[in-house]
Image (cartoon, coloured by chain):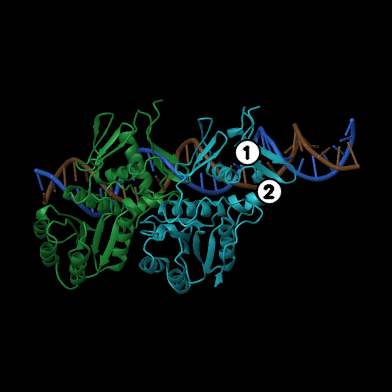
Chain colours: A cyan, B green, C blue, D brown
DNA sequence: CCCGATTCTGTGAATCGTCTGAGAAAGCGC
DNA sequence: GCGCTTTCTCAGACGATTCACAGAATCGGG
């Protein structure tokens, strides 16, 4: 279906190509979802990471695609028109035993039986998700699968600010800082794009779920929260670019 | 609702490659089960441990596979379409005399027969099992068989908390702590992934049986039990990451 | 230096996630 | 078979989190 070659970079966040295959070629991701708009949204976000994305809309095509293109990771909607997630997974495993899978599932489906889905090294996110979350999870899977090179410890560092994606811990200058889930995702997004202005719209699109319908100034609000927690009484790292957005960079030691 | 394993978060167990063959090559496991979904589930979990897995669906193929690939351990369903467990075992022993075997058996299977099967140092688990349990038993077999090099003495340690996988003993700061079976498995899973956030869904998938159909808040409940036993009146080691999951790490000495 | 536009932040309310007690049911040892 | 243990459901309580709203503060262009 929507096959595409690499198409890294656009304007927003610059995807550090910190994950690549051992031979240096781009990571290949297969997205399987029958909701076209969603699949497009996803593939755009993943391409932006510098990954090569291919999307399919049903289980049968997905399996064919997996056989052909040998992806490094698969993003799989558990609700497909032709077969259910478990079946696709089982068959996928027969094709490509070690490929890590990120499942997309409705929030209330979780109860019934994601069982076994995450048994291996896999993971899942519930709809509606934020792109940040999907990308983060996918990076986690890729990192751990070893399909992709690089073992960066999942630590994000900007100046003396450190964010650990595994333990969800954040510290500045050694001092631990407690963040709520939303604050954490916002900071992670900023830190993945240091010294780069991110508009409120971009932030909203990335950090909040794709179906968020609220006021745009939640972003301002959360920036405010973050500043209180990480910039209080020190050289500030979060900066406002009036009319443009926000950016994070190491605080100049006054 | 109180049950949502929301924000699945982080990653599954870290596959410590702490078991390897003397030459450093990966451990090879043969899984023999005719229920394909179950075999897939198992192989996924075992691969995630860093082991090399091959699956077969009947006794004849299993024997052929054993002859060819000389596995370091075998996971064997005692109910196979073509021959029964005893027969497969006997013939297996003729091929590869020393390979340890982990039997999978229905709960109500006749006790004494199993007893006969496991006479030689083998082990078994009853269906439905939890992945943690299978992995743990298999590790035990591998360690004892000496096929794989031993590293860690089967002691898990996080701070002053020590868990002995062989004796099932747990102590904190030297004081012994009694845990029930479920509490033990949960703690073991946490301790095998220190400083890493594990979502309720992941925990459910790993620690509870694959056919568990209950409420996701059993996880909360058992976390609560564990805390009473290991975190009472000391720097807590089990931490909640709201909206993400739980993690264990050494308690800061206040 | 003034003014409108933009950003910041306090308040408060609704919602969400987690913890825990009580007790039913199932399991186990003797 | 009987009592004790363990597992698990249910539901209430509580605290944390998210977010809207609105007024205050700040900025930058003229």
Chain where mark 2 sits: A
- Image point 67% across, 38% down: which residue? A239
Residue B212 in view of the camera: no
Q: Could you tell whether B79 is left or right of A235 in the image? A: left
* Separation of marks 2 and 1 at Cα, in angstroms: 15 Å
* Vertical position of residue A242 compared to residue B159: above or below: below
Of the 4 image quadrants, the one containing the C terminus of chain B is top left
| Residue A89 found in image quarter | bottom left
Which callout, 2 or 1, points at the residue further toward the start of the chain? Answer: 2
Residue designated by label 1: A249
- Classify mark 1: residues with Cα within 10 Å, few (<14), some (14-19) or many (20+): some
Q: Is residue B99 visible?
A: yes
Please state which of residues B108 and B199 is positioned toward the viewer in this rendering.
B199
Q: Position of residue A162 (x, y in %)?
A: 52, 37
Whether marks 2 and 1 lie on the same chain: yes
Question: How far across and down, in percent of the image, does residue A173 sit?
Answer: 53, 30
- Seen as rendered, the residue at the extreme top is B254
Please name whichever residue, A147 or D5, is drawn nearer the observer in this view of the structure.
Answer: A147
Q: Is residue A193 left or right of residue D13?
A: right
Q: Residue at coordinates 42% horizontally, 59% vertically from top-left? A: A100
**Residue A216 position within the rendered picture, expressed as x and y whole percent measured from the top left:** 68, 49
Residue topped by disc 2: A199
What's the mark number on residue A202?
none
The image position of residue A79, as x and y in percent, is: 47, 67
């Amino acid at each position: 279906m929507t096959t595409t070659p690499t198409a890294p970079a656009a304007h927003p966040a610059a995807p550090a190509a910190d994950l690549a295959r051992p031979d240096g070629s781009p990571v290949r991701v297969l997205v399987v979802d029958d909701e076209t708009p969603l699949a497009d949204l996803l593939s755009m976000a993943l391409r932006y990471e510098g990954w090569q994305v291919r999307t399919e809309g049903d289980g049968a095509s997905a399996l064919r695609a997996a056989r052909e293109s040998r992806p490094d990771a698969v993003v799989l909607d558990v609700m497909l028109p032709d077969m259910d997630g478990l079946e696709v997974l089982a068959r996928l495993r027969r094709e490509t035993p070690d490929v890590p899978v990120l499942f997309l599932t409705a929030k209330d489906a979780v109860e019934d039986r994601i069982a076994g889905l995450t048994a291996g090294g896999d993971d899942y996110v519930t709809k509606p998700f934020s792109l940040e979350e999907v990308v983060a999870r996918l990076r986690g899977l890729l990192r751990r699968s070893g399909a992709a090179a690089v073992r960066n410890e999942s630590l994000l560092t900007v100046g003396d600010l450190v964010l650990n994606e595994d333990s969800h811990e954040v510290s500045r200058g050694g001092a631990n800082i407690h963040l709520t889930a939303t604050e954490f995702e916002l900071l992670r997004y900023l830190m993945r794009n240091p010294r780069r202005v991110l508009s409120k719209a971009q932030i909203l699109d990335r950090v909040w779920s794709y179906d968020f319908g609220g006021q745009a100034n939640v972003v301002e609000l959360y920036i405010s929260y973050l500043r209180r927690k990480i910039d209080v009484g020190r050289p500030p790292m979060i900066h406002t670019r009036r009319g443009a957005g926000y950016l994070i960079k190491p605080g100049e030691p006054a």
